[in-house]
Amino acid sequence: MVVSRTKLWWTFLWLGCIGFGGGIAVLAQIYVLIVQKRGWLKEAEYWEAAAFGQSLPGSYAVNAVSYIGLRLQGTIGAIIAVVAFLLPSFFMMIGLTLLYRELQSRQITNLVTLFMSMNAAVVGIVLAVSIKLGRNGVKNYTQAIMAVAACLILLLKILNVVEVILAAGIIGIFLNSLKHSNEAVIQTDASTKSKTDTSSIPSTRPEKRLLLIPLLLLLTPISLPLLGKLSFLFLRIGAVTFGGGFVMIPLIEQEVVKNAHWLTHQQFVDGMALGQMTPGPVLITATFVGYYVAGFLGAIISTIAVFLPSLLITIIIGHPLERFRTNPQVQAFLQAVTPTVVGMMGAAFVNITQAGVTSKIGILIAATGCLVLLKWRVSPALVMLGAIILGIALRYFQVSLI
């Protein structure tokens, strides 16, 4: 499907405005907006984007967004999609950081409570999309077992996301090989078996591109000026850290609080709280750090640096993946990842429920949002807006959401 760059820009700019709740929640909103409403991607293509986003270093949401942009408009599309998606959260974080300097930490905490209802709405959105994805992505007992296994493995922290995806893909390739081997035994006799085996050997040689991460990214030279240190710090974290934005947060804290002493622990925690109040990825906390350390230019450099590695990796790896899409082994890998993503969504639902639903009112908001999305094709933004209005009203009447 041909999508203009203008439509691509405005669609992902809108997604950046409504993309609250972190990477998995944004993946859910991508499904509603890009697959259901716009029809830009098919179900199978969405699974690929979701799996691809969770297989690379950096933010799940940004990786998926860049891959979708690459699919629709090539390299320029990937850049347009990522920039448009990040702009709303970037400018909102700048505004909140300015506000932070004028307010006391106690007031920030009170401000965060206004968004508890929005977090509950995110839980409802993720549950609704998980149910929809489960209906389409789990079609037999094998896929159901893989989905449940992926969910339990992630909840019990036996493996991380990347390991789960790779394990599922390898299992899919193995099962596909067994299936074709059994079919060959049944359908061929001894005289034609050797020919069949010979013809089944792939005749194409897949391209292999090695993505070399410069060793300089692993070290932060002491002699660099402040902006250089900021850029090297976030380039390094963005290039070598797998598992999503929340995995990167402890690493950022280690560097900026304990090693560089740019922020105090309380300032970093407050920055995290502000990051939860913005749409888009949790890694937008890098904007807070950059602005707090080196002003507006520092915010720009930090934001670009932390998201640039995953964007470049997506562009480099995404093009060969397009050519290998019809390869049976690639198809087997992607088909096995489909139910795994459903399991990941289930695990994410459990995790964000523990953090986002802390009262009976929160349960009511989450349940209502889920039912609305399942019953009607309503934009998640409207569910978010309703939750925010309800949160403000409850705050006004001094009804606690906690």
Image (tube, rainbow, N blue to C red):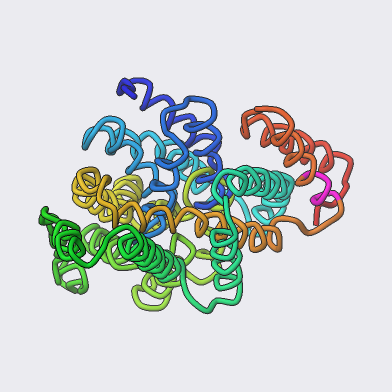
The reply, left or right, for residue 351 in relation to residue 177 is: right
Work out which quarter of the rendered image holds the N terminus and state it.
Answer: top left
> Picture coordinates of residue 294 (x, y %)?
33, 54
Q: Tell me what residue is drawn at x 49 percent, y 54 percent.
A: 282
Toward the viewer: 274 or 78? 78
Residue 380 quadrant = top right
In this picture, is 398 found above or below 80?
below
* Residues shaded magenta: 361-365
Examine the structure image and report whether residue 100 is included in the region drawn in magenta. no
Work out which quarter of the rendered image holds the C terminus and state it.
Answer: bottom right
> Picture coordinates of residue 226 (x, y %)?
24, 62
**How many labels sit on residues?**
0
* Main secondary structure found in the magenta portion: helix
Q: Tell me what residue is drawn at x 83 percent, y 56 percent.
A: 359
Q: Tell me what residue is drawn at x 26 percent, y 30 percent.
A: 73
Q: Tell me what residue is drawn at x 41 percent, y 78 percent.
A: 258
Examine the structure image and report whether residue 364 is included in the region drawn in magenta. yes
Residue 91 quadrant = top left
The reply, left or right, for residue 261 in relation to residue 359 is: left
The answer to whether residue 311 is visible is yes
